[in-house]
């Protein structure tokens, strides 16, 4: 019963998100709108964490399996790939690897810098 | 006979769970990226369907019931976001500038490689939204005049690749910070990267989920500028 109630909330926000995405003029996916709405509900305490977190955590912890059908869908695109497939693969591989490395390095650098600043500030305050 | 059996929804459902669980077992024993359950099950199912000459539509009778859960699972990321909101409040500067610079950097590399490989503007438009979640990528590719079905395939491939190359990249560049790991995975390989981030930890998961939203918004904002650029240079 508890799990059913939790699913109810998650489905409600999924539906709201998809509906708002349908009537919105900009291409924002329903799942993202639903996430933002549910986050707002949790933040402003309209919804309590323990009303959704058991089923919610189960869903997110097993998320990878939900992408299997989309991944298998690759087989329907084999024909378009023709003779450009290797250029595409190289481009995707290079851009993806560089982007992940670049973002990781920048975020870690900036975060450490702001950590240092905060530490110095708190040292000054304590002095 | 094969057709009757394979259009039964439980055929697709069985294949997905069987190969995913098999992948989980193999991955525990041999932690090789090929045995990542997602990658392993996709490859096995494609090979099996091609071998038995079963069309994708038959498999998808069951597949769509699994696919349907992507939305609720993405919505449920709000829980991880709420639990880790303090990190965002504390590091929003680093996170926002990291993603914005990352998207611009990604676009520049993409344009350079497209010139190198003589891709046309249609292909550049198809590739541009590859690091964002499928639903946003579709809209962007369409509005730029890309090949929508190819964008879907590329987005999935990027996601799979991100889950494989993420951890080795972190080891190579000595990225130990959970916020940096999460943001990089989410902005570079969307919800599939987030699935990987969930394995790495709660902070990574929340930051990765958050990065999907921010990256999506930045890509949507940048798209019109790219369109102008494409019509001038390609």
Image (tube, grey):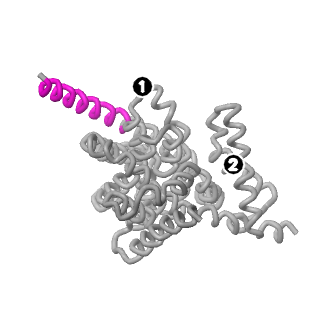
Mark 1 lies on residue: B174
Residue B61 appears left or right of B215: right
The image quarter containing residue A47 is bottom left
Q: Are marks 2 and 1 in contact (CB under 8 Å)?
A: no
Crowd class of label 2 (few under 14; some 14 to 19; many from 20; radius 10 Å): many
From the top left corner, tell me how far across and down residue B216 is, in percent: 37, 56
Badge 2 or badge 1: first in the primary sequence: 2
Question: Which residues lie in the magenta part?
Answer: A103-126
Tell me, yes or no, whether the highlighted magenta stretch contains residue B205: no
The image quarter containing residue B98 is top left
**Quadrant placement of the C terminus of chain A:** top left
Residue at x 64% of width, y 33% of height:
B32
Tell me, yes or no, whether the highlighted magenta stretch contains residue A105: yes
Looking at the picture, tell me which residue is in the foreground, B186 or B77.
B77
The image quarter containing residue A68 is bottom right
- Dot 2: element: helix
Looking at the picture, tell me which residue is in the foreground, B122 or B212.
B212
Asked whether the viewer can see residue B14, the reply is yes
Tell me which chain the residue with mark 2 is part of: B
Tell me which chain the residue with mark 1 is part of: B
- Dot 1: element: loop
Give the Cα separation between the discs numbered 2 and 1. 31 Å
Asked whether the viewer can see residue B162, the reply is no
Residue B26 appears left or right of B219: right
Q: Which mark is residue B20?
A: 2
From the top left corner, tell me how far across and down residue B208 is, in percent: 42, 46
From the top left corner, tell me how far across and down residue A13 is, in percent: 44, 68
From the top left corner, tell me how far across and down residue B140 is, in percent: 40, 63
């Amino acid at each position: 019963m508890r799990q059913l109630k939790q699913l109810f909330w998650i489905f409600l926000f999924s539906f709201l998100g998809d509906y708002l995405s349908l009537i919105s003029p900009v291409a924002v996916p329903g799942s993202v709108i639903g996430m933002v709405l549910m986050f707002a509900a949790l933040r402003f305490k309209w919804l309590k964490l323990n009303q959704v977190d058991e089923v919610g955590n189960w869903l997110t912890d097993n998320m990878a399996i939900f992408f299997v059908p989309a991944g298998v869908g690759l087989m329907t695109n084999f024909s378009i790939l023709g003779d450009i497939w290797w250029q595409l693969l190289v481009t995707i591989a290079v851009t993806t690897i560089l982007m992940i490395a670049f973002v990781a390095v920048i975020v870690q650098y900036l975060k450490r810098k702001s950590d240092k600043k905060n530490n110095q500030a708190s040292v000054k305050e304590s002095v | 006979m094969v057709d009757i059996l394979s259009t039964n929804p439980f055929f697709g459902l069985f294949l997905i769970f069987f190969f995913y669980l098999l992948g989980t077992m193999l991955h525990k024993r041999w932690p090789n990226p090929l045995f990542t359950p997602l990658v392993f099950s996709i490859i096995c199912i494609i090979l099996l369907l091609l071998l038995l000459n079963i069309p994708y539509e038959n498999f998808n009778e069951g597949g769509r019931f699994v696919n349907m859960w992507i939305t609720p699972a993405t919505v449920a990321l709000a829980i991880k976001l709420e639990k880790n909101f303090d990190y965002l409040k504390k590091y929003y500067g680093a996170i926002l500038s990291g993603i914005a610079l990352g998207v611009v950097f990604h676009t520049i590399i993409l344009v350079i490689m497209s010139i190198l490989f003589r891709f046309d503007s249609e292909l550049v438009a198809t590739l541009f939204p590859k690091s964002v979640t499928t639903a946003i990528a579709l809209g962007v590719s369409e509005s730029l005049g890309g090949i929508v079905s190819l964008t879907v395939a590329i987005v999935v491939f990027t996601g799979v690749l991100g889950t494989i190359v993420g951890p080795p990249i972190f080891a190579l560049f000595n990225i130990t910070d959970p916020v940096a790991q999460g943001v990089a995975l989410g902005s570079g390989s969307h919800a599939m990267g987030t699935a990987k981030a969930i394995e790495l930890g709660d902070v990574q998961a929340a930051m990765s989920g958050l990065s999907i939203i921010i990256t999506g918004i930045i890509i949507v904002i940048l798209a019109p500028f790219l369109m102008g650029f494409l019509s001038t240079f390609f």
